[in-house]
Image (tube, rainbow, N blue to C red):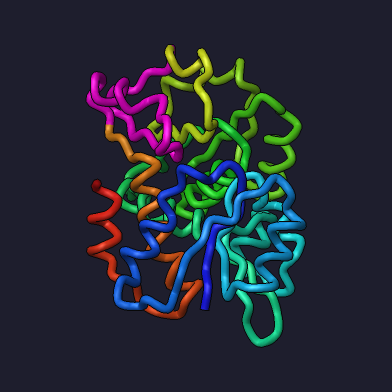
Amino acid sequence: MRYGLIGSPIAHSKSPDLFRAAYHDNADMPYDLIETDDFEQAYARFLAGYEAVNVTAPFKDKAFRKVDVADTIARELFAVNILKKKDGKIYGYNSDFWALQKLLGPYVSREKRPRVLVIGCGGAAKAAALAALKLRMSVMVANRDFQKARNFCFSGGGMIPLRLEQVPQHSASIDILIYAIPVRIDLIDILPLEGRVVVEPNYKDPCLQSRCAEAGATYISGMDWLCEQAISGYRLMTGIDPDEGSVRACCAL
C-alpha cells in the first residue's frame, strides 16, 4: 500500500516525516510527495498507484469534486484534504476541521461565547471558521475578496463576513484570531494581540509568532495544527491507530 501528498509547492512539507513517525513499524507503507501544478495529473497518479493521499493547496476544492462519498464536514466546506479508495469508491474527508476543533476546544466557555476573527477564506480558513462555529463560538470571516467571504458565511450560516478594511474596528472585541493567509499583510501589525489566542496555520514562514511572544498572547502554531491533523487524518487514511507520541515528538523537532 502506498500513500502520499498531492499539492504544489510541497517540497518543504513535513507530511512524509510525520507519516513515518506515525507508522514506524510498517515499512511496507511508503509515503510520497506528488508535486505538480496539474490537479488532473496528480489525481491520475493517485488512482493508478495509491491507497490514499493527503491533499493540500491549491487542490482541496478540486479534490472534493472528485469524490463519490464525502463526510458531513467535507460537504459543508466543499473541500477535502484526504482522498481514500474504499469499496470501489473514492471517499473524501477534511481533517483540517477536526484538528482545529481539538485545538480550540479548551477555549470554549460556558460564561460567554468567545468571539473569533478568521482572516482569509481559503481551505484552512474555512475549516477553522466552521470548527469555531460548531463549538458555538461567534465567528467573523474577513477576506480581500469580500464576495467570497460573504458566500461562505451565508452557506455556513451564523457567521459574519467582513471586508479587510473593517477588521480594525472589530479587532478590540475578539478573543481568538485565526490568521489563515499564507503571506504577511500590513494589517496584522496594528491588531491587538495581548490576552488573545492566536492561531496561524502557516508553519513554514509564520508572521505572528514573534509578536505573540512579545505580547504574551497564547500562540497555536501551524505545526500544532499539522500535528493534530496528522493524528486524526492518518488514522482515516490507513485504518491503523498512529503512534501519537512519535508524531508529537516529530512536530517538536
Q: Which residues are magenta?
A: 190-217
| Rendering quarter of residue 167 | top right
Report the number of numbered marks: 0
| Rendering quarter of residue 212 | top left
Q: Is residue 96 visible?
A: yes
Residue at left offset 40%, top offset 30%: 206
Estimate the x, y position of residue 172 in percent, counting from the top left: 42, 20
199 falls in the magenta region:
yes
Estimate the x, y position of residue 90 in percent, counting from the top left: 68, 74
Residue at left offset 32%, top offset 45%: 111
Q: Is residue 94 visible?
A: no
Nearer the observer, 137 or 32: 32
Estimate the x, y position of residue 191 in percent, counting from the top left: 42, 17
1 falls in the magenta region:
no
Nearer the observer, 228 or 147: 228
Estimate the x, y position of residue 196 in percent, counting from the top left: 32, 30
Please name the predominant secondary structure of the magenta segment in the image. Answer: loop
